[in-house]
Image (cartoon, coloured by chain):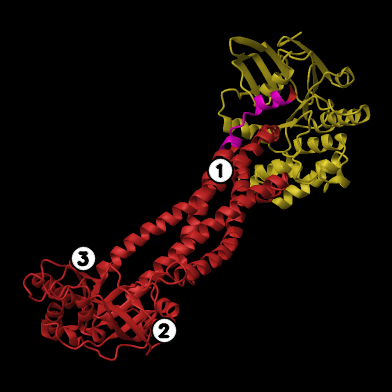
Amino acid sequence: MTREAAEKSVSDGSNTKRTAGTPTSRPGGESGGGTTPPVLEAVEVTKIYRMGPTEIRALDSLSLSIYKGELLTVMGPSGSGKTTLLNVLGCLDVPDSGKVLLDGEDVTRLPEKARTRIRLRKIGFIFQQFYLIPTLTALENVMLPMLEAGLSRKRAAERGRSLLEEVGMGDRADHRPSQMSGGEQQRTAIARALANNPEIILADEPTGELDTTNAGMVIDLLRRLTAEEGITVVVVTHDPRVAEKGTRTINMVDGRVV
Amino acid sequence: MISLAFRNLGRRKGRTLAVLVSVIVAGSLLSSTIGIGDGLVSTVRNRVESARVDIFITGGQLHGITRGHEIAGEIEEMEGVNLSSPMLFSPTTIQVRRPGEAGMPLTPYPVGLIPSRAGVLLPGENDSTTGWFSVPDDPHYAGGSYEGPWTYEIGVTEALARDLNLSIGDPIEVMVDGEWRNFTVVMTYRPILGGQAFSGVYLVFLHLSELQTILSLDVDPSTGAPRDAVDTISVSLEEEYRMDRDLYVSLLDTIREEYPFYDVESKEEIVGEMESNMAMASAFALAVGSVGFVIGALFVSTAMLMAVDERRGEIAMMRAIGISGKTIFSIFFLEALMIIMMGTLLGFGVGHLFYGFMADYIMRSAGIVITGYMGGTGMMIKYTAAALAFGLLSSFYPAAKASRTPAAATLREDVL
């Protein structure tokens, strides 16, 4: 994509089909039936990790449909396959069998380069440990995916500042991660996840390292994104207080949705 | 990306500094050895080229040319030849002392020459000699009879003059046939190799036939016929023959045909051989300097591999948010390359200081003056090529490893 095209795409959201407003999801609808197709769908997905002779079935024929504007929370005990599910849905990992459909397209068979492009343009990731680059300021961290997508430095900086304002970090744009609290770092990470106007945000324990106040702020921010901007958010969490903020919650045990 | 790579260098300041210092040391070692190597090659080549010898004839063994005076005369008669100078170099020393002085005499290596012709052999004669022989010819030879008068003239190297406290015009005794004979110092000479390392190596210069008699190389003892042994005959050509390649080659061929038992070489061949030998010496110096650079490059590689391991989580995050493997490769590659480039630049500066010290040491120990080769085009090309080669080699593997970091597995490990 050319720089001009990238700039247009990021600024007007033309790489997505989202419309702000009410989620088009059907709580509990895992088969994806109905008139609105799911934005993201896992079909009979199995993922097995092999450690020597031992096989761990992290995902076991799991099927799941996620609809536009949903805030889906995923709960379950450690080792139940939550993070693996997130990685498979986010094109970071490929399942051993089954399909993952993003906007109806099977992404599991795409080459790594194409999946990287999808992650860059359609998916935003948020991690428990924030993973901001310590040598960059908040603004520069947010600009990183935009520059990779081909935006000019100037446009990336403008949009970066606007995103930081949106997450309440406007006055901290020039601070480095070491000068920010955990909550501020996570809000910066959310701004980074929003950088290329993604359809979907996948958050792995985004409040895991935050105190109650900051955790509340972060989850409210994610809710606002779904409600106001129509972004689909999937949050993996252990925290029932976070889970209850979702529009739908699923529970996982042994790689299956129960 | 460049800014990110540069800032990443500041993450582990101590380690970056240590690696940088290792590259600086390596770079200075490499640049100074290249500079000294190239300087030596150029200095020696210039000396050879400045000598006005166009054709060089040797006998293939010690004192291998007989009838030296005669052959030199024959060659000098050839069209296009300006001068033909026979010379004798002895690997055995003779004894000299200040007149009447008891104690151990000094033992210089003698060189026999015909003064009117030997100028062709003494490069930069005006710079390296003070005074000259007053008798230009070689009267003792006397048409091969060796019964002509002795001139008793002698030239000495500056080191010998200094150690015997001699000046031009002073008498000096030389052992001839078991008895001391009085000679007169007429010339002092500063050889190409001098300085402290060669301060105990003395040379003296005598009329050719007088030295032949001293060394019993004048007549054949069994037949009494003239032997007239010399080691080399140096031929200087007239300008026309020197400049015209066809004339030059034709004369060279004529001499080869006339004297098939001797080795006849052109100046070009001599310089070529010398350059080939010097190129080997230069390559050796480059190899020695490169060892330091390889170690420096390994330092960089190791430090970068450590950085890749430490930043696995961060790399996985970057892969997760869609940063391509190519971008990650470029960031780490640039980091390593920056250290190498900064180190080599600073190393060049430090190397310049080393070069100064080494050139000064070589001048004092060996008397060879090396100037102006640090920063020469050839030297810069070699240095930059070596720096780039090692920079690329040391940067490539860590960068490739970073770009291949498996994102999902690494993030899972980090969570666990």
Q: Nearer the viewer, mark 2 or mark 3?
A: 2
- Residue at (88% x, 17% y) in the render: A240
Using residue B93 as the reference point, say whether residue B352 is left or right of it: right
Q: Position of residue B85 (x, y in %)?
A: 21, 80
Using residue A204 as the reference point, say whether residue B246 is left or right of it: left
Give the main secondary structure of the magenta stretch: helix
Q: Residue under label 2, please give it.
A: B166
Question: In the image, is residue B208 above or below residue B271?
Answer: below
Q: Which mark is residue B62?
A: 3
Chain letter of disc 3 in the image: B
Residues A128 and B111: in front is: B111
Which element carries disc 1, helix, strand or loop? helix
Which chain is tinted yellow?
Answer: A
Chain letter of disc 1 in the image: B
Q: Position of residue A156 (x, y in %)?
A: 73, 47
Q: Do badges 1 and 3 share one subunit?
A: yes
Which element carries disc 3, helix, strand or loop? loop
